[in-house]
Image: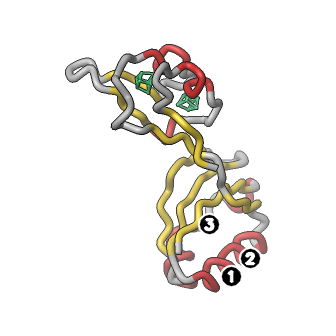
Amino acid sequence: MKKRVNLTFPKRAINIPLTYRLAKDFNIAANIIRAQVAPNKVGKMVLELSGDIDQLEEAMDWMRSQDIEVSLHGREIVIDDTTCVDCGVCTGVCPTEALTLDPKTFQLNFLRSRCVVCEQCIAACPVNAISINL
Ligand code: SF4
Ligand code: SF4
């Protein structure tokens, strides 16, 4: 099964080779969705973990034992590209440039790694193409 988790690292845990340990010790594949990690600072990461349910629980317990805060990641922006008409209105309200129009094709691009789930784009879309996945 898959689980998305938010991780917050204390300074001392920044250098743990997390994806390697998850794969080697728990047989879990970890896909980094977002990461803000700088040396000697608190780091934040969103990971998608894939593996056996029991091993996922064990891996989360292990991360917590390393003083990493682990919480399940809930909210995600979803864009229905069959409804979207590429009008670009949402790009004007997005504070992080997660939403942009491709200058060549004029089609909407969504860069999930930049999205902070502020939800401003949801109300802005005239055709209700944007929703939130809880
Ligand atoms: S939720 Fe906020 S940050 Fe994410 S795409 Fe919409 S406007 Fe941009
Ligand atoms: S506002 Fe809605 S229809 Fe317009 S580009 Fe954004 S998602 Fe597509």
- Asked if the residue at tag 3 contacts the one at tag 2, i.e. Cβ–Cβ closer than 8 Å, the answer is no
- Asked if the residue at tag 2 contacts the one at tag 1, i.e. Cβ–Cβ closer than 8 Å, the answer is yes
Question: What whole-number distance in Å separates the C-alpha atoms at marks 1 and 2?
Answer: 5 Å
Q: Quadrant of residue 15?
A: bottom right
Q: Judging from the image, what secondary structure is the residue with disc 1 in?
A: helix
Q: Residue furthest left?
A: 104
The numbered disc on residue 16 is 3
Location of mark 1 (residue):
58
Question: What whole-number distance in Å separates the C-alpha atoms at marks 2 and 3?
Answer: 15 Å
Mark 1 or mark 3, whichever is nearer to me: 1
Question: Label 1: few (<14), some or many (≥20) within 10 Å?
Answer: some
Q: Looking at mark 2, is its residue's CB closer than 8 Å to ligand 1? A: no
> Which of the two residues, 107 or 39, is positioned nearer the viewer here?
107
Q: Looking at mark 1, is its residue's CB closer than 8 Å to ligand 1? A: no
- Three-letter amino acid code of the residue under disc 3: Ile
The numbered disc on residue 61 is 2
- Asked if the residue at tag 3 contacts the one at tag 1, i.e. Cβ–Cβ closer than 8 Å, the answer is no
Question: Label 3: few (<14), some or many (≥20) within 10 Å?
Answer: few
Image x and y of residue 27, in percent: 50, 83
Q: Judging from the image, what secondary structure is the residue with disc 3 in?
A: loop
Q: Earlier in the sequence, mark 2 or mark 3?
A: 3
- Three-letter amino acid code of the residue under disc 2: Asp
- Three-letter amino acid code of the residue under disc 1: Glu
Query: According to the image, what is the colour scheme of the structure?
Result: secondary structure
Q: Is residue 22 above or below residue 36?
A: below
Image x and y of residue 40, in percent: 69, 48
Image x and y of residue 78, in percent: 50, 42
Q: Is residue 134 above or below residue 103?
A: below
Q: Residue at x 43, y 36 (%)?
A: 111
